[in-house]
Amino acid sequence: MLLACALAAMGVVTHAAEPALKTVFEGDFLVGAAVNRRQVEGSAAADVGIVRRHFNTITPENAMKWGPLQPRPGAYAFTEADRFVAFGEEHGMVLIGHTLVWHQQTPRWVFEDGEGGPASRELLLERMRDHIHTVVGRYRGRIRGWDVVNEALNDDGTMRQSPWFNLVGEDYLVKAFEFAREADPEAELYYNDYSLEGPRKRAGAVRLLRQLLDAGAKVTAVGLQGHYSLEHPSARQIEETLEAFIALGLRVMITELDVNVLPTPWGGGADVSVRLAADAKWNPYTDGLPADVERRLADRYAELFGIFLNHRHSLSRVTFWGVTDASSWLNNFPIRGRTNYPLLFGRDGRPKPAFEAVVALGRTSAPGSE
């Protein structure tokens, strides 16, 4: 009672009878969330209560990306990443590292030679190796798995012409996995990407992963980011994508799950470089989500978790990209200042009908059964 009163005074919403997601899906897969600095530090008390109660795995939203970790050559800033690890260990959670090699949120100096020109292949590989060895080595044995390479493909399945690709070549992925394995041989290593449900991108990812496996890369699992909308991709597309990667002998994970309920003027996807001007017609629910859209969101989440449960023997984790609607990146992507409702917990920290739909589905499915 005293704890409940204290939490209430801090603004934490408590639901003693509310089933914990991690308990509902125990024996099926881990259930997690991406957490930010305020949540890890404890200043977002309501979010912390949700994370502790409902999730058994966490991913850092930004703390382990190259930019925040090594903004200048050799100048590592581990404070926020260390807090993330300490928070997860304190609460007995499985920790996921995100992300080692990505074309976004990587400082320009990484790709330059120090004189304003492009870095050589040898220099860039040396920097990649040093960064991966330093970061992964620091948390060796403490972080279960790493998103080693993030978003290496275009939507048509071809290789993204990123600085990594252009300066090193396509084997930069093999090298990244090689360096990560050297730094922590026991860690799980993942390839992570968005829109893999599209047939062309899926085919390209299958080709890429076959090449990586044939080259001897240790790839433990494929991360489907899961930035979905109310209608797209279809359930069939998601099923086919999971099955395509499972057929390669890989495990699958849903790594950044959310469901966008707002209009998508840019055609979907999760390319963070896309930025559009604000317009009221793209932000229709500033005063709350209409009941009919709320029902559609609940139905969509029930559909998604039905698919996940159907593949529970190969799908080992479902991570939401955020804790509550208030902390979702979709409030500012691709248009800043919108009001989105993509997660299971509302801005007040209370579970939404989508939460209830997911829990109801989980309770009717025996853990570990087909």
Image: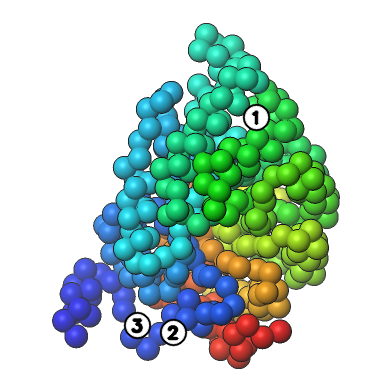
The Cα atoms of the two marked residues, 1 and 2, are separated by 44 Å
Residue 160 visible, this orientation: yes
Specify the quadrant of the image occupied by residue 52: bottom left
Q: Where is mark 2, residue-wise? A: 19
Q: Is residue 156 left or right of residue 328?
A: right
Question: Mark 2, residues whose alpha carbon is within 10 Å: few (<14), some, or many (≥20)?
Answer: some
Question: Mark 1, residues whose alpha carbon is within 10 Å: few (<14), some, or many (≥20)?
Answer: many
Percent x, y of residue 123: 58, 19
Q: Where is mark 1, residue-wise? A: 164
Mark 1 or mark 2, which is nearer to you? 1
Residue 341 visible, this orientation: no
Please tell me whether mark 2 sits on a helix, a strand or a loop.
loop
Please tell me whether mark 3 sits on a helix, a strand or a loop.
loop
Q: Nearer the viewer, residue 176 or 326?
A: 176
Closer to the chain start, of discs 3 and 1, is 3
Please tell me whether mark 1 sits on a helix, a strand or a loop.
helix
Question: Mark 3, residues whose alpha carbon is within 10 Å: few (<14), some, or many (≥20)?
Answer: few
Give the amino acid at mark 3: His
* Residue at 42% across, 65% down: 93
Mark 3 or mark 2, which is nearer to you? 2
- Up-down: is 249 above or below 276? below
Mark 3 or mark 1, which is nearer to you? 1
Percent x, y of residue 85: 37, 53
Specify the quadrant of the image occupied by residue 262: bottom right
Percent x, y of residue 6: 18, 75
Give the amino acid at mark 1: Trp
The Cα atoms of the two marked residues, 3 and 1, are separated by 47 Å
Percent x, y of residue 308: 66, 73
For the C terminus, the image quarter is: bottom right
* Residue at 59% across, 77% down: 28
